[in-house]
Image (spheres, grey):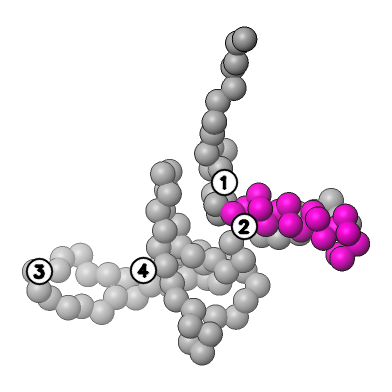
Amino acid sequence: MTTTGRFVTLDIDGNILPGDWYLRLSGEGTKMLRGEIDMTSVIPIVPFPDNAAFISQEVPTVMGPGTTRSVSLIFENRRITNWTAADSYSLVYAVTSRQGYWL
């Protein structure tokens, strides 16, 4: 028997998806089939509901060993939730096999 298939990663097409993406997607599909949410042709979830886009930075060009400097990083909230300290939101830089991105 000949096989010609191969395993690929979730981000092979350049779109970064969380590891539980297909579990979440099938869960939403189940809700549609049960009539718990409306049927739609639009994917009812977003991969990262609380992510950010890097806008700009102001950082020193040189920092000597042991020095402490202030920097400015500006991000845009690209999703549906308001970020508040009370809700313990924090900015995290994640790296995949292909690229890094801000969450």
Which tag is nearer the camera, tag 1 or tag 3?
1
Whichever of labels 4 and 1 marks the residue nearer the N terminus, that label is 1
Question: x and y percent of residue 97 in the render?
Answer: 41, 44
Residue 15, label in figure: 1
Mark 2 near mark 3, Cβ–Cβ under 8 Å? no
Q: Secondary structure at mark 1?
A: loop
Position of residue 71 relative to residue 51, above or below, is below
Element at label 2:
loop
Could you say which disc has been placed on residue 47 in the image? 2
Q: Earlier in the sequence, mark 1 or mark 3?
A: 1
Badge 4 amino acid: Gln
Does any portion of residue 63 appear in the rendered image? yes
Q: Residue at x 43, y 72 (%)?
A: 91
The three-letter code of the residue at mark 3 reads Gly
Cα distance in 3D space between marks 2 and 4: 26 Å
How many other residues sit within 10 Å of disc 4, few (<14), some (14-19) or many (≥20)?
A: few
Please give left or right for residue 7 compared with residue 26 in the image: left
Q: Is residue 94 left or right of residue 19?
A: left
How far apart are the two marked residues, 2 and 1, measured between alpha carbons?
A: 10 Å
- Counting residues from the N terminus, which is met first, the one under dot 2 or under dot 1? 1
What amino acid is found at the position of numbered circle 2 in the picture?
Answer: Pro
Residue 37 place in picture, x, y as percent: 86, 64
Q: Which residue is mark 4?
A: 57
Q: Under tag 4, what secondary structure?
A: strand
Q: Earlier in the sequence, mark 2 or mark 3?
A: 2
Near mark 1 (Cα within 10 A), the count class, few <14, some 14-19 or many ≥20, is few
| Dominant SS in magenta | helix
Q: Quadrant of the N terminus?
A: top right
- Magenta span includes 33: yes
User: Which residue carries the number 3 mark?
Assistant: 64
Q: CA distance from mark 2 to mark 3?
A: 40 Å
